[in-house]
Image: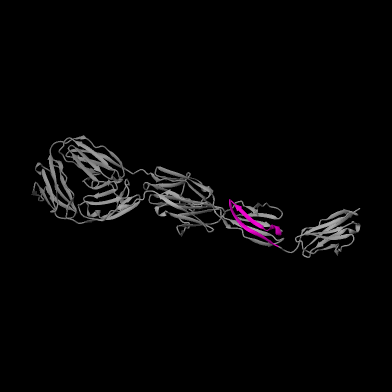
């Protein structure tokens, strides 16, 4: 035995399939595979295929850790080759580190990768982080930075940076600091007799003092001061010119200031708001221009006043007023309203679901009959509705199909595939579809019970049986590599998976190698015929002769060394002047030199364990 085609080195991209293949000179049912010195057995990582003289090792979804030398061993001989996995061997040169900061300060996380131009995704408690007014992301070659400004106690979390599936994690701990204003007062312009509300919010619940033009404000009939949790609210019921000025809210460790303008004039909208449509997670921008450049306005979304925050930015540039909404979500869909004195306008914000798309669409599946087939895909987001179809028929979990959902990954498992399962399979999510074919390559035939050596005596029946793994598979029988055909002494039968070959009345010459072949696979066994008792292989034949002719009665034994006796009509014949008895190898011959009417009768040749008889007729 030797290798016709030995193993060759294999190089594949990361996550792809590697295949080592060899061909040997002799059919061997099974070989041993090794990774280094470790024996390989079939599992999710490895598939082993033995196909006569060809033997294959398949390594699925290759990782860098799979690089090694792989060896096949057959009957004491080996062949070795090396697996190389291609791709970027990315690693964190400097991972992110735990940060502890006080409320109101900036938390900064830095990392350095081994390669440039590698995108990094940041997560907060496994939720993807998007840039906003308080969240900044920087990239400088291999270095990546995440900055979180004005942090609060609620920002305590786990931060994760992920690059090409490799994570680096650190904890952000925000400790309590001095009280400060998380939402500050905003400049505002109102009309006389309007009700005014000045609001701010603290990082913690502490007492505050309100001031108007440096004079402490005391609650009165027209002015109320109240606290709602961390919110501090100053309300003026009917604004007048004397309420104009600077307002301050002071908590002792921080203060916030706003200018209040009271106008009697008429403010007009020069350029109104226009509706905006964005996808979930995108940024929406609204702009309005009013007739005056020294008037402060107020923005509302679905009736609620907006203040600057991580996802809300408000810009006043003279007469132009801008609202920027970061990381928009579908529930925010509704009316955006702007008001500055008596100038008011509104427009609609529509936040749409990101369209479904297939990150990994379906691909064709090729497999053997009775194997398990698996269609897999990855979708961009969890769809509102989805279904699997074969042709136009919707599929559900049953004995034949299993529907698997793992987050954004979906799979359809086809159990014990048959030819009738072939066809086009489709995954439909909302208004998007992906399809692939299931192709049955054939059956993976195995000899459940191969043929076995048989030893019989001469004249007995030798029988060989083989059981296959599948029904309706034709087999071919061989004797010493010569194909056998049914005959008087050779019988072949089939019963489902069971196939039988029978030799009747075997002789010593029938000793041979018997082989059965099915779909290129073979099984061999030895037929051994042992010597038995003597018997007649060629029997006497009835004969009609003419008077005075020489008559020879001939028969043949299974052995050359065997004594016989001749009889006529039951009486033993002895040689005489007219009758001779001869032996020629296995042949036994009785000769009557001149046949006469008296020689008519029944002649027998008896070897003790067998007898042959024939009639002799003499004509004139």
Residue at horizontal 71%, vertical 63%? 531
Judge whether residue 513 is colored magenta. yes
Frontmost residue, 408 versus 104 = 104
Magenta part mainly helix, strand or loop?
strand
User: Which quadrant of the figure has residue 36?
Assistant: bottom left
Q: Position of residue 77 (x, y in %)?
A: 52, 57
The type of colouring in the image is: one colour
Q: Residue furthest bottom?
A: 608
Q: Is residue 229 left or right of residue 486?
A: left
Q: Position of residue 397 (x, y in %)?
A: 46, 52
Q: Quadrant of the N terminus?
A: bottom right
Q: How many numbered tags mark residues here?
A: 0
Q: Is residue 199 left or right of residue 598?
A: left
Q: Residue furthest top?
A: 270
Is any part of residue 92 visible from this angle? Answer: yes
Is any part of residue 373 visible from this angle? Answer: no
Judge whether residue 548 is colored magenta. no
Q: Is residue 514 left or right of residue 403?
A: right
User: Which quadrant of the figure has residue 325?
Assistant: top left
Q: Position of residue 353 (x, y in %)?
A: 33, 44
Frontmost residue, 75 versus 355 = 75
Q: Position of residue 604 (x, y in %)?
A: 83, 61
Residue at horizontal 42%, vertical 43%? 433
The segment highlighted magenta reads: 507-530
Frontmost residue, 216 versus 71 = 71
């Amino acid at each position: 035995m030797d290798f016709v085609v030995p193993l060759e080195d294999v190089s594949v991209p990361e996550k792809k399939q590697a295949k080592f293949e060899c061909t040997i000179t002799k059919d061997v049912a099974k070989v041993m595979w090794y990774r280094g010195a470790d024996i390989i057995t079939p599992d999710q990582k490895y598939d082993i295929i033995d196909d006569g003289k060809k033997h294959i090792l398949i390594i699925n979804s290759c990782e860098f850790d799979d690089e090694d030398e792989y060896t096949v061993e057959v009957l004491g001989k080996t062949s070795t080759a090396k697996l190389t996995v291609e791709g970027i061997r990315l690693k964190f040169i400097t991972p992110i580190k735990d940060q502890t900061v006080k409320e109101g300060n900036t938390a900064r996380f830095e990392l350095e990768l081994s390669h440039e131009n590698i995108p990094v995704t940041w997560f907060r408690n496994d939720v993807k982080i998007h840039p906003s007014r308080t969240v900044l992301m920087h990239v400088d070659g291999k270095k990546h930075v995440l900055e979180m400004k004005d942090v609060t106690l609620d920002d305590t979390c786990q931060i994760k940076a992920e690059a090409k599936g490799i994570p680096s994690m650190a904890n952000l701990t925000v400790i309590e600091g001095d009280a400060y204003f998380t939402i500050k007062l905003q400049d505002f312009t109102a009309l006389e007799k309007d009700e005014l509300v000045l609001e701010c919010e603290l990082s913690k619940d502490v007492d505050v003092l309100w001031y108007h033009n440096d004079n402490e404000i005391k609650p009165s009939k027209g002015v109320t001061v109240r606290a709602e949790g961390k919110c501090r609210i100053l309300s003026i019921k009917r604004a007048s010119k004397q309420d104009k000025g600077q307002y301050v809210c002071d908590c002792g460790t921080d203060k916030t200031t706003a200018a209040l303008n009271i106008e009697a004039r008429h403010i007009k909208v020069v350029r109104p708001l226009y509706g905006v449509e964005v996808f979930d997670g995108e940024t929406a921008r609204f702009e309005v221009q009013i007739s005056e450049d020294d008037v402060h306005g107020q923005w509302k979304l679905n009736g609620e006043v907006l203040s600057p925050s991580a996802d809300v930015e408000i810009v006043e540039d003279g007469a132009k007023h801008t609202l920027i909404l970061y990381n928009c979500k579908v529930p925010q869909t509704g009316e955006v309203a702007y008001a500055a004195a008596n100038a008011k306008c509104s427009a609609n914000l529509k936040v749409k679901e990101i369209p479904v798309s297939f990150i990994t669409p379906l691909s064709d599946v090729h497999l053997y009959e009775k194997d398990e087939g698996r269609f897999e895909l990855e979708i961009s987001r969890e769809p509102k509705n989805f279904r699997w179809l074969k042709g136009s028929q919707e599929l559900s979990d049953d004995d034949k199909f299993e529907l698997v959902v793992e987050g954004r990954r979906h799979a359809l498992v086809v159990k014990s595939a048959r030819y009738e399962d072939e066809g086009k399979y489709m995954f439909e999510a909302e208004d998007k579809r992906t399809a692939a074919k299931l192709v049955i390559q054939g059956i993976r035939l195995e000899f459940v019970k191969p043929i076995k050596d048989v030893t019989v005596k001469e004249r007995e029946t030798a029988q060989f049986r083989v059981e296959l793994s599948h029904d309706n598979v034709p087999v071919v029988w061989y004797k010493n590599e010569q194909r056998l055909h049914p005959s008087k002494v050779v019988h072949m039968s089939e019963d489902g998976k069971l196939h039988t070959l029978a030799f009747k009345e075997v002789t010593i010459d029938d000793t041979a190698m018997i082989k059965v072949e099915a779909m290129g696979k073979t099984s061999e066994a030895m037929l051994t015929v042992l010597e038995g008792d003597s018997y007649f292989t060629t029997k006497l034949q009835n004969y009609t002769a003419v008077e005075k002719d020489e008559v020879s009665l001939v028969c043949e034994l299974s052995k050359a060394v065997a004594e016989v006796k001749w009889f006529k009509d039951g009486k033993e014949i002895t040689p005489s002047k007219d009758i001779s008895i001869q032996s020629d190898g296995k042949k036994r011959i009785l000769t009557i030199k001149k046949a006469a009417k008296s020689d008519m009768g029944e002649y027998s040749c008896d070897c003790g364990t067998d007898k042959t008889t024939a009639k002799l007729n003499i004509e004139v």
